[in-house]
Amino acid sequence: MHREAAALLEAARATPVNGIFEHDGTSCLRELLKVNQVPSRLDRGSPHVYIRPVGATVRRINQSLVEDDAGSWAVIETLRHTGVRAEELTELTHLTLVSYRLPEAGEVVPLLQSVPSKSNEERLLLVSPQLASVLATIVKHLRDANGGKIPLVARYDSHERVTGPLLPHLFQRRRYWQPQVMSEAAVKHRLDRTLEVTDLRDQAGQPLNCTRHDVRRMFTTEAVTGGLPVHIAARILGQKTLTTTQAYLAVFQDDLVRTYRGFLDRRRADRPQDEYREPTDSTLDRRNRE
């Protein structure tokens, strides 16, 4: 969905205003709103690209916003691979991408630095290959849409009711003439819109309801059942007590058995092989009598 919207936007941008272009077998006209045709605005150009299928009676389409909304996958994937809160997501900037060199091996690993205003405590998250791909796509999207640079935008904190400094925020959207930092409400809207478009259902056949904190719980459950200790998960989530982290877990009986068996297998593999001896008949007889 996002690739299709991005391809159509790229084709429209390459077409002069009032020009016609072909895309996927459809003829489209690139338009310019009358409000943007005044001399003062013509000089700086419009941040939005409007198109209309030739011969169609539908209203013009703001393809810039369509492509922007289609980028919901980046929001969801970042939440899924980091477990950050929605507020923390909107606070991420290009400056939060840092690197760390491992002392022993000398290997450089990418990290995501988070200093959430909720706790005001810094924490570092290891960037997985999947997350690195998502973040690289976000950075490329911002640069392609803004002449090779990431716009500096001030974020308004709706909780503390203060406006922060100009920073290269990763999660921006261009609603009007100037880019804006995505709000927590916009994050919720993108998640709800994605569920609506995909038409996912629960076991009862009802439309699936998934909140931002549900994605955070999914991250925690997947990490812990995959072998990550709970106390490490708590540090990654920025939680001070294990009780809070355990409340995020949704571990079912089969997950519990599978994870514990994996733990036993790993522990057994770490022991020297000469410690494992075949039981003799006398040993088995003695155990049977006991």
Image (spheres, rainbow, N blue to C red):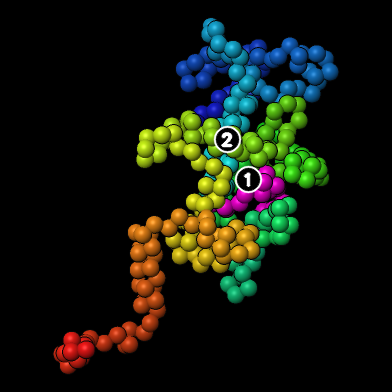
Does residue 243 sit above or below 53 in this rendering?
below
The one of 274 and 18 positioned closer to us in this rendering: 274
Q: Mark 1 and mark 2: span between their CA atoms? A: 12 Å
The chief SS type of the magenta part is helix
Question: Which image quadrant is residue 33 in?
Answer: top right
Residue 162's x, y, as percent? 81, 43
The one of 199 and 247 positioned closer to us in this rendering: 247
Q: Residue at x 29, y 85 (%)?
A: 276
Pick the quarter of the image with the C terminus: bottom left
Question: Magenta segment range?
Answer: 81-98
Mark 1 — residue? Answer: 86
Does residue 95 sit above or below 12 in this rendering?
below
Q: Residue at x 57, y 59 (%)?
A: 244
Amino acid type of the residue that numbered disc 2 sits on in the rendered structure: Arg
Does residue 9 sit above or below 22 in this rendering?
below
N-term mark: 1 or 2: 1
Along the horizontal axis of the image, is 274 left or right of 173? left
